[in-house]
Image (tube, rainbow, N blue to C red):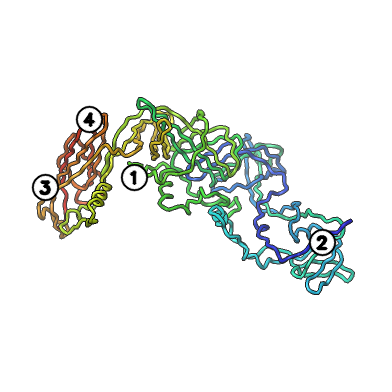
């Protein structure tokens, strides 16, 4: 026989008890294994999980309640003639044996033991049998919310449901049965407790457990026995991030490799099939949790799924390019490179990957994937060798401010006063010529939008964005600027007809403008240059077999939006002049 004495300090927090709702219940749940996952780039995955269920009066329970988007959680049985007719989600109080870690736990574990309790101050002593204690509301509960210490912690705490109006219960009075009767001892005056005899350190604690149950029927009768059971649901916390490696080979050959980094914050994968989705997903209730999930917010997701905390400009571009298949404007010149997802992919051996089209989506299939929840993996998707053509792209967009530009009251920006600085500023404004790889998709799968790293003999050349390219489509993959190809554009007014048009009381002059673009190549071999000039006005003439197309941009304006294009072959050292003439109405 021996005694254990506990010295009691100030009241300890119970915040940990408030977060223990996810502890598993001691039931016989049906274990399911994830067989298939369709993973989208925007952070959601559609999960299929199946297992063998043993029914009790037709009911089966599951080891875990999935967090599913509203309207996407479906339970089913693959067995012919067996179906699910009812699903119930509830929170049950489950008794669990747990090692006592504080005074409350030790008191609960040792009810009926002989104890000696000493008080503070005057040292009063109570000796007797420990009874069921009296619990009360924790007075410090609302002041104990832990402060986030990292962005991930902040995301987790932001997702924790609001605290209830009634604080959780904590130890308020010890009850000791003495010769004189039951003594109710306030906890805050207790100095220490001695437990005489063996001290039990295992307490039976009631813990809330989320339980998902389903009833199986066969026809109109309750099903009895064993049957396969499955769950299907859409959940936030699965994402794949694509990335290309473009290896430039001799004779204008290109080895294209696509890899995907898979982020899994949803469920353990064990020899599962991944279906990496290419396309624009449309799930209208994806951000709303199903009531069957018994949650009010998505919880415990990494920062990869907290888009609201990202820089808005970067977030929007990722939404339109990395996370869907929408081609962004202004992409020539690698304009997206600064906003491409920087998550590195893990090198993986190239493996044959099949795929299939379903409506407007394409699914890359990756078999035999084992990945724990919270883990990341890099998977090889495909590798192809393709021919490419070197092309050079020059593009200048419309000024959009022609009325000011041709107005007599327009004053251009003043000089900096430094000839060198002015020259550099003017040079920086000029559109540059970009080298691009023109590739036709002759593979059996579309190419998803993703950053592409170009290398030659493992020497880095550039990283740019490869835009979505369907099977049979053609794409220009920009690499670097071409400083050996120089361009110069000059425009001048050649004629002005005063008051040529009057609209709604406003007089307009008709201005004729002559433009000239000079392209000089200092490359060692002949090049193919595709030049594009967009302007506001009606084109009257164009040289060098150029084409002028009126666009539908702002058709209510007096002057149309026009795109001029030239497709040229330029020899080494040659200078080509591209001229055009157009008219534009300018208000007086």
Q: Residue 50: x percent and y percent?
A: 62, 38
Mark 1 or 2, nearer chain start: 2
Q: Residue furthest bottom?
A: 122
For the N terminus, the image quarter is bottom right
Query: Disc 4 and disc 3: Cα gap in Å?
Result: 32 Å
Query: Disc 1 and disc 3: Cα gap in Å?
Result: 33 Å
Task: Between label 3 and label 2, give the one nearer the viewer.
Answer: 2
Query: Disc 1 and disc 4: Cα gap in Å?
Result: 31 Å
Residue at 84% in and 60% down:
195
Find numbered disc 3 in the image and state the secondary structure of the residue it sits on: strand
Tell me whether circle 1 and circle 3 mark residues in contact (CB < 8 Å): no
The circle drawn on residue 5 is: 2
The circle drawn on residue 494 is: 3
Q: Residue 234: x percent and y percent?
A: 54, 44
Mark 4 or 2, nearer chain start: 2
Task: Between label 1 and label 4, give the one nearer the viewer.
Answer: 4
Mark 1 or 3, nearer chain start: 1
């Amino acid at each position: 026989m021996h005694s254990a004495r506990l010295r009691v300090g100030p009241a300890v927090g119970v915040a940990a008890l408030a977060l223990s709702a996810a502890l598993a219940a001691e039931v016989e749940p049906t274990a399911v294994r994830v067989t298939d996952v369709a993973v989208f780039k925007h952070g959601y995955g559609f999960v299929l999980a199946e297992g063998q269920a043993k029914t009790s009066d037709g009911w089966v329970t599951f080891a875990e309640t999935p967090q599913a988007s509203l309207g996407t959680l479906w339970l089913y049985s693959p067995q012919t003639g067996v179906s699910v007719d009812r699903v119930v989600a509830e929170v049950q109080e489950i008794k669990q044996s747990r090692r006592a870690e504080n005074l409350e736990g030790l008191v609960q574990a040792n009810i009926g033991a002989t104890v000696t309790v000493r008080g503070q101050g005057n040292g009063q002593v109570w000796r007797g049998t420990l009874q069921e204690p009296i619990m009360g509301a924790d007075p410090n509960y609302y002041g104990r919310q832990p402060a986030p210490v990292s962005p991930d912690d902040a995301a987790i705490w932001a997702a924790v449901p609001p605290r209830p109006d009634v604080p959780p219960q904590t130890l308020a009075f010890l009850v000791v049965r003495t010769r004189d009767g039951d003594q109710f001892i306030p906890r805050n005056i207790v100095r220490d407790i001695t437990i005489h005899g063996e001290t039990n350190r295992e307490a039976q604690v009631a813990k809330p457990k989320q339980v998902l149950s389903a009833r199986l029927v066969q026809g109109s009768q309750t099903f009895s026995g064993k049957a396969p059971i499955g769950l299907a649901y859409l959940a936030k916390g699965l994402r794949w991030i694509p990335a290309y490696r473009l290896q430039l080979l001799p004779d204008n050959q290109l080895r294209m490799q696509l890899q995907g980094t898979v982020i899994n914050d949803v469920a353990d994968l064990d020899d599962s099939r991944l279906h990496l989705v290419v396309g624009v997903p449309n799930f209208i209730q994806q951000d709303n949790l199903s009531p069957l999930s018994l949650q009010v917010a998505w919880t415990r997701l990494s920062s990869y799924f907290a888009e609201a905390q990202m820089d808005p400009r970067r977030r929007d571009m990722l939404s339109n390019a990395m996370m869907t298949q929408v081609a962004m404007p202004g992409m020539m010149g690698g304009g997206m490179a600064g906003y491409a997802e920087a998550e590195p992919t893990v090198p993986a051996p190239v493996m044959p990957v099949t795929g299939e089209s379903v409506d407007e989506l394409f699914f890359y299939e990756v078999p035999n994937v084992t990945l724990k929840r919270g883990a990341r993996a890099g998977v090889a998707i495909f590798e192809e060798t393709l021919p490419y053509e070197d092309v050079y792209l020059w593009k200048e967009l419309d000024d959009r401010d022609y009325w000011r530009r041709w107005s007599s009251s327009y004053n251009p920006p003043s000089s900096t006063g430094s000839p060198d600085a002015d020259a550099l500023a003017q040079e920086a404004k000029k559109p540059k010529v970009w080298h691009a790889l023109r590739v036709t998709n002759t593979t059996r799968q579309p190419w998803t939008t993703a950053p592409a790293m170009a290398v030659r003999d493992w020497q880095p050349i550039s990283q740019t964005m490869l835009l979505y390219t369907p099977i049979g489509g053609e794409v220009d993959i920009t690499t670097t600027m071409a400083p050996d190809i120089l361009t110069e554009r000059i425009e001048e007014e050649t004629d002005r007809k005063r008051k040529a048009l009057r609209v709604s009381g406003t007089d307009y002059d008709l201005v004729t403008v002559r433009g000239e673009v000079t392209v000089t190549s200092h490359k060692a071999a002949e090049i193919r240059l595709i030049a594009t000039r967009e302007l506001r006005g009606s084109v009257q003439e164009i040289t060098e077999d150029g084409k002028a197309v009126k666009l539908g941009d702002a058709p209510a304006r007096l002057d149309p939006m026009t795109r001029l294009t030239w497709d040229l072959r330029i020899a080494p050292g040659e200078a080509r002049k591209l001229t055009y003439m157009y008219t534009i109405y300018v208000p007086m």
